Image: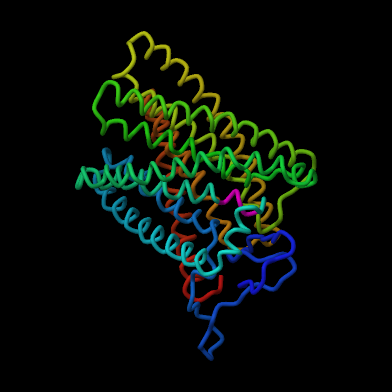
Amino acid sequence: MPSSAAPTAPVRLSPNPDGRLDAPGTAPRRASTGRSDGRRWSLRPSDHVGPNWFTAVMGTGILATAVENFTGAVPWLHVVAVVALVVAWIVFTAVGTGFLAHALRDPARFRATLGDIAIAPFYGAVAMGVLSVGAATFAVAGRHLPAAAAATAWVLWALGTVLGVATALLHPVRVIAVHPAERRSPTPVWALPVVPPMVAATGGAVLSTTVPPGGASFTVLLVCGALFGLALYLGIIVFVLAYGHLMRGNSLPLQGSAAIWIPVGVAGQSTAAANQLLAHAGDVVSPPAHGALHAIVVAYSTVTLILGAAAVAIALRVTVSALRRGMTFSLGWWSFTFPVGTLSLGLFAFGTTLQASWLLWAAAAVCACLTGTVGMCLVRSARFWVTGRL
């Protein structure tokens, strides 16, 4: 929907189930065709690419990392992880290229997404997509190309961290600045811009092993600790607002029901981040301090995973209800993937900390669910990318 003149009022956009960004009350843009058999082939797939498409990058990236966690026990899974990494990079390249092409082709529309409270949270997905692909590259390709994988991971970590901190800090300001009616209607999507610093904290803790021990690694871990604290503080606020809004009798739109899974990612990702920070802090803090940190992390992880389990139960109930009422596939279904992946990472990291096999088995079961969900979303999304139909 290219604009031929400057709008006289702020452009309000909304993410359609098919991934397009259209102004409310307007007919969605149709892809170009050229076929007479009823199928619409998208000649310009970038017409459909907004920041919400990066949830697909998040899902494929975290799948590669989650699968790689289990290659120590099941070596052949490394092949699966490599395939998942290749797919993640293909999705990242396609979505990133399409998004940039869309922004360059229609800059007015791109600027409108930055100021729209319904769309702007998805720039958190852009940050997390970049971070998840970087983390997956280091985890999976690090054993084959250690230097190249580490360099790539650091570049993507820096880019994703800067963008993620920006989304985490600017979104609350944007919410406060909008009309009070918007401010009184928080949704789980508001978690998207505040989770990226937690993802950065997890990835940064792992990457701290690639810098010289001592001051450099301590600095990296200190930065990661600050990122963890920022995301946790903002994440708690979003949890309270979003779930409080739902408990007061409000409900999500039918096709947007998958968004109920987004806050689950705060629980899983924070557990993974806390345990990764603990695992890599032993070389930079004294033994007594590390022992105290161990006790804090165990207590935090226990409470967080219990709350996460409750959040999963709520999400499952909402999802099953939506499916019974006729919810059909949309790009919003990618919202199922990353939170499930973070739960696998969190359970695995906590299980490693405690040396608890049952937690590792639970992580493997969640990873299996993640694999099926990502596969289904990937096939359906690829069909839309090519044909323009869901």
Q: Is residue 88 above or below residue 272?
A: below
Residue at the outermost bottom position: 36
**Front residue of this view, candidates 131 and 300:** 131
Residue at the outermost top position: 288
203 horizontally vs 128: left or right: left
The quarter of the picture where residue 86 lies is: bottom left
338 horizontally vs 169: left or right: left
Colour setting: rainbow
User: Could you tell me which quadrant the N terminus lies in?
Assistant: bottom right
189 in the magenta segment: no
The residue sitting at 53% across, 41% down in the picture is: 166
The residue sitting at 51% across, 66% down in the picture is: 102
The quarter of the picture where residue 186 lies is: top right
Q: Main secondary structure of the magenta part?
A: helix
Magenta segment: 118-122
Where residue 117 sits: x, y (%)? 67, 50
Where residue 301 sits: x, y (%)? 49, 25
Q: Is residue 123 above or below residue 280?
A: below
216 horizontally vs 365: left or right: left
User: Could you tell me which quadrant the C terminus lies in?
Assistant: bottom right
Where residue 213 sits: x, y (%)? 25, 24
**Front residue of this view, candidates 165 and 291:** 165
Where residue 347 sits: x, y (%)? 44, 33
For the image shown, how many numbered marks are present on the structure? 0
The residue sitting at 56% across, 64% down in the picture is: 107
